[in-house]
Image: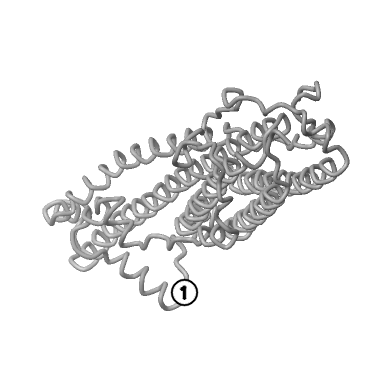
């Protein structure tokens, strides 16, 4: 015949789509299993403002949709290959008269064209792409940052360096926590604004998902290019358009996961800074109160005299530090606004399009010259 159709290559492409489906399932399981948060982890304020559970379910459904499209397309490609085998047997004379496929200029150029690396080549390809096991290897979670790393690189020691000496109240809280395993003040704080380690873990999940989905999209790009030289004609052109759009949609999912990673990292830093701020303010204020009360009781001094001695003893600097925390809090509120902007951008990203590859089957995979358009 005057144009190329290699059913074996189409079957290999179908096997690749099965790997895409498997990759989507792995991502979906990572999303649903590794992002669980208790009410204590999430925090009441974050639950009301951000809705972590809703975000998780939305991203899980998007990956399930990717899986459904890949599985449906896999079945279709196997049927395409079988159709060509049967058509070649029963209608060889007709196929021999059919013209060449449509020119390259008719091909779809998506918004992500070239993102996967090299420009497309229309030379026959070796049909190589990343295997399912390699996709799974991208879904390993990075360790969350330690408290020391958070203080050193994210918060620049502003909260830790603001204290002069050791806080009596802070030391007492630490001893009490070691004895009974519970810090009442910390627990109240976490119920309101959440636990930063939980949000840090979710950020690593989104990062891992973004890397895995990006790899899937790159492979759809490469695998679809591998069909050139092995499948030509109207059906091939239509399939190329479809899978390039499918690739674009998968890249969009990678962008969505990356946006969520950025948003959750902002939440993580926000919570961590609030934790430090809250601890420093509580410890400093209670230290001042403790000093005033104990000094007055021990010396039998009047309150005015005690306050005067407190000012002379360096406590005024601690009071000024408490006031300066208000400025830090304003900066944190500004960061919180960035969180909403980032998550809003993620919510506006397109979802994976519904699978319409079955339209090709409705046209019986017409060959060039059969007089039907797709």
**Residue 304 position (above or below residue 115):** below
Q: Is residue 95 left or right of residue 320?
A: right
Quadrant of the image occupied by residue 103: top right
Q: Is residue 303 left or right of residue 21?
A: left
Residue 236 shows up from this direction: yes
Q: Where in the figure is residue 55, as x and y percent of width and height?
A: 61, 44
Q: How is the image coloured?
A: one colour
Q: Nearer the viewer, residue 295 or 141?
A: 141
Q: Where in the figure is residue 195, as x and y percent of width and height?
A: 48, 57
Q: Is residue 196 left or right of residue 346?
A: left
Quadrant of the image occupied by residue 39: bottom right
Q: Where in the figure is residue 353, as x and y percent of width and height?
A: 68, 35
Name the residue at 79% across, 42% down. Answer: 84
Q: In which quadrant of the rendered image does the C terminus lie?
A: top right
Read off the residue under disc 1.
181
Name the residue at 31% across, 65% down. Answer: 169
Q: Nearer the viewer, residue 64 or 79?
A: 79
Name the residue at 77% across, 46% down. Answer: 81
- Decide: few, some or many residues near mark 1? Use Cα within 10 Å; few <14, some 14-19, many ≥20: few
Q: In which quadrant of the rendered image does the N terminus lie?
A: top right
Name the residue at 57% across, 63% down. Answer: 133
Residue farthest bottom in this picture: 179
**Residue 236 position (above or below residue 36):** above
Residue 38 shows up from this direction: no
Q: Is residue 311 left or right of residue 48?
A: left
**Residue 245 position (above or below residue 54):** above
SS under mark 1: loop
Q: Where in the figure is residue 102, as x and y percent of width and height?
A: 65, 25
């Amino acid at each position: 015949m005057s144009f190329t159709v290699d059913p074996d290559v189409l079957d290999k492409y179908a096997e690749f789509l099965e790997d895409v489906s498997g990759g989507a399932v792995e991502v979906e399981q990572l999303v649903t299993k590794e992002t669980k948060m208790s009410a204590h982890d999430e925090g009441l304020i974050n639950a009301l403002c951000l809705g972590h559970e809703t975000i998780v379910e939305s991203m899980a459904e998007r990956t399930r949709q990717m899986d459904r499209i890949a599985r449906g397309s896999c079945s279709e490609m196997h049927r395409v290959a079988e159709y060509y085998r049967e058509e070649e047997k029963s209608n060889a004379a007709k196929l021999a008269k059919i013209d060449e496929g449509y020119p390259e200029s008719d091909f779809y150029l998506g918004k992500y064209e070239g993102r996967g690396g090299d420009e497309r080549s229309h030379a026959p390809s070796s049909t190589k792409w990343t295997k399912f096991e390699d996709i799974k290897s991208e879904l390993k979670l990075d360790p969350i940052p330690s408290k020391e790393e958070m203080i050193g690189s994210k918060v620049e020691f502003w909260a830790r360096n603001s204290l002069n000496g050791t806080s009596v109240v802070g030391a007492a809280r630490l001893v009490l926590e070691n004895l009974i395993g519970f810090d009442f003040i910390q627990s109240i704080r976490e119920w309101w604004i959440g636990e930063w380690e939980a949000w840090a873990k979710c950020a690593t999940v989104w990062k891992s998902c973004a890397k895995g989905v990006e790899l899937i999209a790159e492979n759809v790009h490469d695998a679809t290019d591998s069909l050139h030289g092995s499948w030509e004609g109207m059906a091939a052109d239509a399939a190329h358009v479809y899978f390039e759009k499918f690739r674009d949609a998968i890249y969009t999912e990678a962008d969505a996961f990356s946006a969520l990673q950025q948003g959750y990292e902002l939440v993580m830093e926000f919570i961590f800074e609030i934790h430090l701020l809250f601890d420093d303010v509580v410890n400093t204020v209670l230290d001042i109160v403790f000093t005033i009360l104990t000094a007055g009781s021990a010396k039998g001094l009047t309150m005015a005299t005690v306050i005067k001695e407190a000012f002379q003893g360096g406590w005024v600097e601690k009071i000024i530090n408490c006031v300066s925390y208000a400025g830090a809090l304003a900066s944190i509120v500004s960061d919180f606004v960035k969180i909403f902007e980032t998550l809003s951008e993620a919510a506006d990203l397109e979802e994976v399009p519904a699978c319409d590859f079955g339209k090709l089957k409705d046209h019986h995979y017409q060959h060039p010259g059969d007089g039907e358009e797709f």
